[in-house]
Image: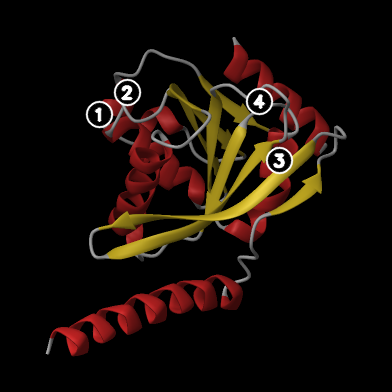
Amino acid sequence: MKKFLKGTLITAAVLAILGGVAYHFIHGLAPRTTVTSYTGVEVEVEPMSFYRGEGKVFGRVYRPVLEEAGNMPAIVYCQNMAYGERWCKALAGKGFLCYSFDFAGDGEKARSEDLSAVLKGIRNQRHVDADRIYLLGESNGCMTASLTFFDHPKLAAGLILVSPGFNPLEISRKARRFRGDILVIDGSQAMWNAATEIAEYVRR
């Protein structure tokens, strides 16, 4: 009986590992790799997932490959991995750890729960300055980033929105009471200029 249970547990563990590997390949999450950013900095890219309840949020983390990589500010991109790739590559080249992911839930409440799980998980990662985690929203990710930021102000140090199409300070009572700075980026400008503007906001 003990041998049977041991064999069953080993089989289950192997299947779980293979299942995770298969999921990452099916969803385009290649194993750890290195790419070159627009600034010429080598950027390490690897899959990283976070638990949300009984499910998981899957994404990619981008880290600059530095000889002395201490804790650095982190930027969480809110939209999806496909759109986030260019932003994360550019910002990692500026010296930040960046994370993009695909929302697992539908609707603003579920999307906000996904984002909250990511923010709680990313702060415990290697090389992350837990007091300097920023939200970067683009397209419909702007609303999710804004609502999450104002509802959970301790989870993020700042909010960056790319062409939001609405006034973030008017979306809720909590937002109207906010007295900090929000960076709004013109999405039509060159990526290099936008990344530089974001870097100045994060480093101030």
Q: Residue furthest left?
A: 1
Q: Quadrant of residue 30?
A: bottom right
Residue on which disc 3 sits: 187
Q: Which mark is residue 176?
A: 2
The reply to whether dot 1 and dot 3 touch (C-beta < 8 Å) is no
Against 65, residue 16 (above or below) is below
Give whichever of 3, 37 is nearer the camera.
3
The amino acid beneath tag 1 is Arg
The reply to whether dot 2 and dot 1 touch (C-beta < 8 Å) is yes
Label 2 secondary element? helix
Q: CA distance from mark 1 to mark 3?
A: 27 Å
Residue on which disc 1 sits: 173
Q: CA distance from mark 4 to mark 2?
A: 23 Å
Against 131, residue 26 (above or below) is below
Give the image location of residue 97, x and y in percent: 59, 34
Q: CA distance from mark 2 to mark 1?
A: 5 Å
Q: CA distance from mark 3 to mark 2?
A: 24 Å
Q: Which mark is residue 198?
A: 4
Near mark 4 (Cα within 10 A), the count class, few <14, some 14-19 or many ≥20, is: some
Label 1 secondary element? helix
Q: CA distance from mark 4 to mark 1?
A: 26 Å
